[in-house]
Image (cartoon, coloured by chain):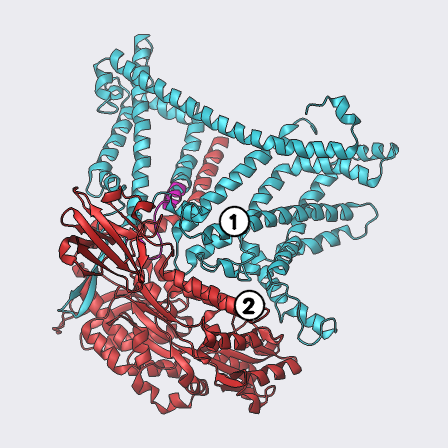
Chain colours: A cyan, B red
Amino acid sequence: MKLTDLEYLKLPKWRRALIKIAQFFISIPKAFLNLFVKIGQFFKKAGLAIGREIKDIVLTFKNGDWKTRISYVIMGFGNITRGQILRGLLFLLFEGVFLFFMFKPTGGLYWLSMLPSLGKEGPGKAYDPVYDTYVTAYHDNSFQILLYGVLTIFFIIAFIFTWRLNVKQNKLAQQILDSGKKLKSGKDDLRSMVDDNFHKTLLALPLTGIVVFTVMPIVFMILVAFTNYDGTHDGYSNALFTWVGLDNFNTMLGIGSGTKVYAATFGEILLWTLVWAFFATFTNYFLGMLVAMMINKKGIQFKKFWRTVLVMTIAIPQFISLLYVSKMFAQNGMVNQFLQSIGVLKGLDYIHFLDEATPARISVILINIWIGIPYLMLIATGILMNIPQDLYESAKIDGASGWKQYTKITLPYMLFITGPYLLTSFIGNMNNFNVIYLLTGGGPTNSAASTAAGSAGYTDLLITWLFKITTGAESQYYFASVIGILVFMIVAAISLIVYNLMPSVKNEEDFQ
Amino acid sequence: MKKLIALVLAVAMVLSLAACGGNKDNTTAAPQPGTTTEAPKPADTTPAPGTASPLAGTYQIKVWAPEAAVELTKKQINDFNSSNADGIKFEATVEAVSEADAGTNVITDVDAAGDLYFFAQDQFARLVLAGGLAQLGQGAGTIVKETNDAGAVAAASVGEDLYAYPLTADNGYFMYYDKSAVDAAHLGSLEDLIADCEASNKYFAMELENSAWYAISFFFGAGCVSEWTTDNDGKFIAVNDDINSDKGLIGAKGLQKLVTSKSHIESSDVGEFSKGAAIVVSGPWAYNDAKNILGDNLGAAELPSFTVDGQSYHMGNFSGYKLLGVKPTTDAARSASLHKLAQYLTSEAGQLERFQAIAWGPANKAAQDNAEVKANPSLAALAAQAPYSKVQGNIPGTWWDIGKVIATDIKDAADEAGLKGALESYNTKIQNVLKIDTTGFILVGAWNDWKNDDEAYRMEAKDGAFMFTLEVPQSDYMGGRIVVPGDWGTDRGCLIVTEGVDLLDQVGDPNNGDNNIVFKEAGTYVITYNEAANTITIVKK
């Protein structure tokens, strides 16, 4: 249904709201479609780029002189013979290190050859009659094979990249010499590292750090999801682990004929995680804003005092206050005992704050408000003070009510500035381990989920369930990894869609 | 100058990344496969002069002991160094690791675990499966069997083999009570105690919804059993559990009385005495803390009886043990020396010393007869409870998760049908621990291109066994295995072939634990798989 602006504005308010909501939902499949189109385009581009590279490599070989051609095998040869000794030696050194790593015993080739099987021989136990004792003989280590296998693959990629660079340099050097210009010397190279190539010098370390400490572990963890790595297959001291394909995903998502208890548990926890993240984010957001507005209001006394009182909750480490609060709301905790002593509750009656499914879920959301409001209040205070007062003044002159001013001035301004914050805090809340684990430990126990590894409870989020799975009875690391991947996919999808719908992104110029 | 600052910042950023990634790095510190099988380095075992023992030498070891036992263990290791006849010297670092977490920590990284570690019995089965425990030699095994009580030996055994040294026999529970709040005449009856607590607004603390270990008390009281059997590798193959029965229903009714009472709180912490509890069900380890709170008002008694349909049942308990484990090593001399130390630490003298210092009840028979041990009030209460207790055997880790839910289900049950439902759901879950799926099994292998969900090769159930007539075509590798549909699990016991072994080329692959059966020649075979006994028979047609 297409409407012109005029038609749209003529409609009654509720229909306009409905249309807006409908448009949001209509735009979701489109957003997904866009995503897939973009992914497709990316792969197409990448394919074309690789094709171009290969063509260039072949052409360089065809057109190159003997120095260039030898450089295809001995890296840096061209550089050295053309006088760029430093560059050449670096290339040569890299090639040397690479070849040494690949061909040394239990080196790159060993790891690569073991990667498809993740080890052939598990540990064995033998009786030693002389000492009257059992000794263990350890053999292959699946964990290391996986880890070093990944490392080797990264190293190979780095080598291919460097080799390509080496070929490119030869081509470039040839061109420069042909045109009669001089090549850069080692000294020039060094100087350029702090001059026109300074950005590369700066980024070299962080980039290596990110690849080694972030990207590689992530790749490794993702691969774990496709193995049977758990407490009884630790790959070294009890039994090897091996590839199992998509089995773990099938079990977790209930595909195929296996047990359905994981899928049911996953579904239930995912739903609660989303509900929790929604409430935890928006209750904090609006109530925090409200508190900030109340404190900011003209005529309120002791502003600093109120702010200090609220900020006190930040000053106490969260895990202490949360543990304390969980004790406070226990069956024989302070709150219940107080209510008993003033006669609201008779005898040993008590309110099930944390030990029944629905009350516990409500309790954690409410307690989270108490923890979250101060942060929001601080953020909101700053932003609210920044809203130009003349907007409000002119609104007043026009006869706008307080509520109108809020919905037309304050809220759009806040949403514009804190849109990205809202998104990150929604995602943060999906992974809010602290609040849930310290308050309820995931409890009360969910009887239906007790056979799904780690026995999930009613307030467990995916992240606390993941924790229970790894530390639980069977230490099923592969399920933890599967959950990690699924959470990432869900979070990524939500982020991409919501980010593109945000006012801060859509109407970038609104408040500038 | 600006560039310099930028460079410094870049380095700082990398360092902070490195700090985050630090944990990951640790895991790569495991020894390389190439080096692990090497013989022990001579430097580790420099022979002490004047001794002939092949064990003589100095060893660097790490011991994990609970906080309370750290100092004592250090002293005992020093005593061992000066007293042993073999010239073994240990340079030990003793780290405080709770016996309740030791199992999890060992399983997480066996390499980094302590060479000796104290652990509670419930982790035993997991540790054996995880390769975290070294089997005892024959000499050591005989000594342990002779000197410790039968339950302790059973607790440290898998099949016939011993895998740990019993440290204590006091891992059971009984009732601590406040003498000023509880009428001594009512101690024998659960109903009276609950009524007393409700009348005086006091709490009755017992963990039921959080711990299967305590909740089982009512079912044992009603005469139920729950026993698991493992094969010699520590893998669970059978369970004898009659909680889903009329007896179990009696236990459930008893449990419901306590768990639905307003006076009941979920805790086994004697600290509850200072927060209005009159009764706390806990174990000997809490004695000193309880004494500090209640002083002379502290009483310790066996668990009470509960009454269902006019008949009374005495609540049972698990009698459990704390054990000392030795981490497997590749070096025979080191391994033998560690076992010597473990023997010393768990000997009669060692256990008595531990009792005197930190009040741990001994498992050693001679030490149990010691007059001082007999006079300890908490151990006396445990002894009074002993006739009603069941030895805690090997229990799969998941049972603890399944078992604790039963109390929650009973609490929520409105009527008898609800109680029965709770017991049934429990029963289904424990049966599922052994067999993942009840829909039968698939014969997967060369004959169906290893399709693990191939309906054409589903085994049919006949007379309690699964049967299939299999045609094996000629190929290079005429092997396969029995799996649960859609799974690759290799735990379907093909290693135990009771009939027709001579038809097979190979049973199982010792290298990677695949329980494949490989036929010698092509032909038609009738394969019968008995799931309960976990055996298969093969007959050629």
Do the numbered discs 2 and 1 sit on residues whose CB atoms are within 8 Å?
no
| In the rendered image, the vertical position of residue A492 relative to residue A58, given as above or below | below
Residue depicted at x 53% and y 48%:
A270
Q: Is residue A332 left or right of residue B312?
A: right
> Does B44 appear in magenta?
no
Q: Is residue B523 left or right of residue A214?
A: left
Q: Which mark is residue A267?
A: 1
Image: magenta residue range:
A217-237
Which element carries disc 1, helix, strand or loop? helix
Q: How many marks?
A: 2
Q: Which mark is residue A121?
A: none
Residue bearing mark 2: B418
Q: What's under tag 2, amino acid-wise?
A: Gly
Disc 2 to disc 1, C-alpha distance: 25 Å
Residue B120 visible in the displayed image: no
Which element carries disc 2, helix, strand or loop? helix
Chain holding disc 1:
A
